[in-house]
Amino acid sequence: MELLIKHHNLFRNNKKYLFFIILLICFSFCANAQRATVFYKESDDDFPNPERGFYIPHNTHASGFIPLNEERMKGDRTQQKKHGSATYPVYATIILREYVLDSFTNKPLSESFLNKVENDFTIVRNAGVKMILRFSYIDKTHSGSCPDKEKICPPYGDAPKDVMLNHIAQLKPLLQKNADIIAVLQEGFIGIWGENFYTDYFGDASENAAGKIVDEGWKDRNELLKSLLDALPKDRMIQVRTPQIKQKFVYGPRASADSKPSADSAAYNFTDNERIGFHNDCFLASKDDYGTFVDYGSSVDPKKPANEILRKYFENESRFGPVGGETCDDAFSPENDCAPAGHAEEEMRSMHYSFLNTAYNNTVNNDWDSAGCMTSIKRKLGYHFVLQKANFPARCKAGAALNFSAELKNSGYASPFNPRNIVLILRNVQTQKEYFITCKADVRRWYTGNINWNESVKIPNDIPAGKYELFVNLPDNYASLAGRPEYSIRFANENIWEASTGYNRLNHTITISQ
């Protein structure tokens, strides 16, 4: 309209030319007068989706290495199976691979061991799954007359900082090369099980020592976490065992438990501070999840309870990164049960859980199955996108702007935590040739709740005239996996998934003219 007013005096005596200008403006976009609204039906099916759901643990020791099994993992991804003492079957698109470096607590990693790890990465890629990755040095405890209330006594068996840093430097080329099949790296390394508590070198917060972590211990922990962040590409994140580990990294060793969470505007900017998520390996095991939500102090502050403060921090911070873990004890029943007796699902929702261990601890998990909420949990861990309706033009010109909108719902507990493209695909009905248009929307910001997706994309100039089916694909961001359907996100709708390509059919055909 502004263009018409600007040129009114010039063309007021030339109505034919004025009509041509109006026509030109209108046809720079797809014809808005002819549009179609498509409605979609939600599916109740349980199906695999990448980087979410229940995972299967696969631990191995350097002293007795057991390689991964490709065919087993393919079967776990494509068929629902029960694992361990679980009463419920799951599809598993992710595994936890923990390498216990028990042979290398005082020396570099061997070439033989590094080759075995690289071979594992190849097996994972071939199987079409991804890995949650953790390295530790010890997964056993020994008791004695020490002061610790759990009677876990030193020496614990982890490695000194210089050994760890050297190991991380050795692993860096492998992590960089194989980042495509790493869903997330857990900090690990420090302490028994790599859970950053019972440690010989990084500040023992148990009753066996100071009962808190002094500044030097936090500085050493921060140095190790920084080296891990540097070892990964910027588009991959790290999970830490407690929320306070992130606070101390972001704000320093004397950061308080009420430190502020990240701002929404800072999320997903690939800085170190925004690449840290959480794994809670004692989910709903006690009031503070066995020390997950405790203030471990500093040189000038004592260890003290901070359950409510740290839980609120976790809830706010976990919107923007990977959250997962496992249950470890049923002592907190009925709080860890299904509603109304417990609040397991409410906790997963408020803390944005994407994955949990299916093999441990099934005294807790099996209660969810018998009480009737496991079906919901399996569906909602991570993201769960449902198309509701979409609006498209009926026809469009090559080179013009295609404006469309869609209403979706994410009924999952979280959004995807790794970046991935959203691709609109036009497939010629006659020739089956496909044309790909990358959209601007960021699927990581498709948070729980309603999603209004509005896009304006340009139709390729060289697309031949004809009728085209519309699809949307949410492929993996790495070229090595982008063409593999098992790594694409499937919408939870009936009759739209095209298994051979990983596309979601939009049930609309558009006519393209030249």
Image (cartoon, helix red, strand yellow):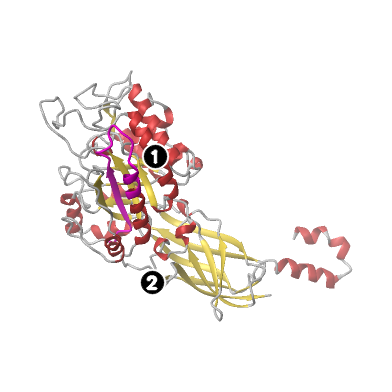
SS category of the residue bearing label 1: helix
Residue reaching furthest to the bottom: 430
Looking at the image, residue 31 sits to the left or right of residue 147; the answer is right
Residue 423 image offset from top left, x and y in percent:
52, 62
- Residue 110 drawn in magenta: yes
Q: Is residue 508 above or below residue 443?
A: below
Label 2 crowd (10 A; few <14 / some 14-19 / many >=20): some
Label 1 crowd (10 A; few <14 / some 14-19 / many >=20): some
Looking at the image, residue 282 sits to the left or right of residue 33; the answer is left
**Number of marks present in the image shown:** 2
Can see residue 143?
Answer: yes
Mark 2 against mark 1, which lies toward the viewer?
1
Looking at the image, residue 352 sits to the left or right of residue 369; the answer is right
Q: State the residue in front, 312 or 471.
A: 471
Look at label 2 and name its amino acid.
Glu
Residue 79 image offset from top left, x and y in percent:
27, 66
Can see residue 259?
Answer: no
Which residue position is annotated with label 2? Answer: 494
Looking at the rendering, the stretch of residues picked out in magenta corresponds to 91-116
Residue 475 image offset from top left, x and y in percent:
46, 60
Residue reaching furthest to the left: 145
2 and 1 marks in contact (CB < 8 Å): no
- Residue 147 drawn in magenta: no
Q: Is residue 221 above or below residue 422?
A: above
Which residue position is annotated with label 1? Answer: 170
Give the image quarter of residue 403.
Answer: bottom right
Look at label 1 and name its amino acid.
Gln
Q: Quadrant of the C terminus?
A: bottom right
Q: Tell me what residue is drawn at x 33 percent, y 19 percent.
A: 299
